[in-house]
Amino acid sequence: MHPFAYFEPTTVDEAIALLARHGGDAQLMAGGTDLLVEIKESLRRPAVVINIKKVPDLGGLACDEAHGLRIGALVTVRAIETSAAVSRLYPAIAEAVREIGSIQIRNRATLVGNVCRASPSADTLPPLIAAGTVAAISGPGGARSVPLGEFFTGPGRTVLTAGEIVTAIALPPPAAQAGASYIKHGRRRAMELATVGVAVSLRRDGDVCRDVRIVLGAVAPTPIRATAAEMLLEGRAPDPARLEEAGCAAQDQSRPIDNVRASAAYRRAMVGVLTRRAIAAAWERTT
Amino acid sequence: MTDGLHAITVTINGEARPLRVAPSRTLLDVLRTELGLTGTKKGCDVGDCGACTVLLDGTPVNACLVLAVEADGAAVTTIEGIAPAAGQLHPLQQSFMDLGASQCGFCTPGIIVMAKALLDRHPDPSEEDIRFGLAGNICRCTGYTKIIEAVKDAARRLAAAPPPAGR
Ligand SMILES: Cc1cc2nc3c(=O)[nH]c(=O)nc-3n(C[C@@H](O)[C@@H](O)[C@H](O)COP(=O)(O)OP(=O)(O)OC[C@H]3O[C@@H](n4cnc5c(N)ncnc54)[C@H](O)[C@@H]3O)c2cc1C
Ligand code: FES
Ligand code: FES
């Protein structure tokens, strides 16, 4: 592997100071499952790696009905997968995390790292955006919060500026009668990046849907909201005709590319199918 | 930037090993090269194949995606530390031999370490638990059926006679 200097800060301020001092030559490392692969494949050549795993303030997974879900930067994907509270209150997040790589990978990979890598196909992004997640950011200029819906600016690109660290992400408590789902489509069942991923969150109000959020992954440079499909469902019952319309609307809004995993045409067709299924699955969970 | 060496101590299969390593060295390379523990295999070197699986403080990880410096102060168990004592085999090792779950054997160390982690957590796994647990371990030879049978067989042996704690 390309050589680098290595630091283990023990506070957030120290990590920010190191990032500020070394600028573009430095890379933060949490689990390293993206960063080390990128260094090995010479996609990145950082002179400095700053391992944040020794910063106690970046840990902590808290999940309950009253306060919602707070995930510190060091919380592994596996810790979320094995949390009974997350499975009960945030089923779409639980569905997404168990789809990532293998248990070995999930024991190292952090959820916040999955967010910061900003891969268009990252599994946790659609359900996190659909759930209304907000990122807590600290940097040389102080602290700020950014909703994940506004966090991604392109493949591998985010609103983070030089020296900024995501310290945690927070999900609001689920609403009464809420339902959520995430469906990942790949060529095989495990160790596979998403060809298409669709997340839905909604609330049941009698026979109709409210607060519908539909987020598509792997079909655009960043995860995108299928806003036209959301509007078609808002205040309506999710009957088969409506699901069909919503699926077509989501399909029209997707902007997939051809790559090794699938053609653009296939991805677009799958957006329609998966959007219908994901809405139906989220609706089922409201009862 | 200089690539200065870092002094670390890692407890490997029960034995504290002081080492001096460059930060860009992976735990996998240090195990295999500096320590001569070549039971842990290097297949892909990027997390895809599971041949390098070791236990880091009891947790299964890909040693190719862990920096050796990160293991400072930790306990690492490799395939060499799975057997309960010299001249004895862990029930998983015995079952893999008895049921022909290893052909070329390249994947076997990683699979046995991963299966041990699985059985430590789920002593009586379903077939689905085993398949889910071994999803990150690729075997090009066996077709997996015999591997899954061997893990089930080892679970039965362990239930009948739990071995003394591994090293
Ligand atoms: C074999 C394999 C299979 C995989 N399969 C999947 C899959 O199926 N689905 C999927 O979505 N992903 C998959 N991944 C990628 C997934 O493991 C990563 O995206 C992981 O979640 C990133 O977390 P990390 O802690 O390892 O990040 P790192 O590699 O440590 O960091 C990733 C990037 O984020 C930055 N970063 C990390 N933490 C912070 C922070 N707190 N603040 C600011 N920047 C930060 C780093 O500087 C780096 O640029 C796979 C990876 C491998 C190797
Ligand atoms: S060598 Fe580490 S997973 Fe393949
Ligand atoms: S026995 Fe040859 S790779 Fe598994």
Image (tube, rainbow, N blue to C red):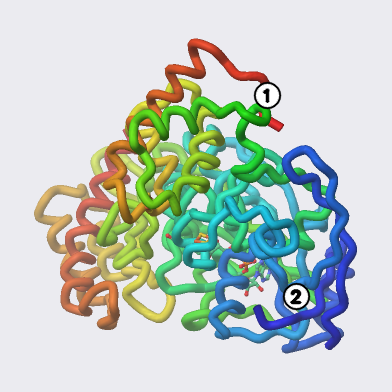
| Residue B163 occupies quadrant | top right
The amino acid marked with disc number 1 is Ala
| Residue A116 occupies quadrant | bottom right
Q: Is residue A232 left or right of residue A12?
A: left
Front residue of A263 and A280: A263
Residue at point 81% right, 78% down?
Answer: A5
Would residue A37 be visible to someone looking at this image?
yes
> Where does residue A241 sit, x and y in percent of width and height?
10, 55
Front residue of A40 and A170: A40
Residue at point 49% right, 58% down?
Answer: A128
Q: Which residue is mark 1?
A: B165
Q: Is residue A240 left or right of residue B80?
A: left
Front residue of B85 and A207: B85
Q: Few, some or many C-alpha atoms within 10 Å of disc 1 (few <14, some 14-19, many ≥20)?
A: few
How far is disc 1 from disc 2 in space, using C-alphas? 37 Å
Q: Which residue is mark 2?
A: A49
Judge whether A82 appears above or below A22 on screen: above
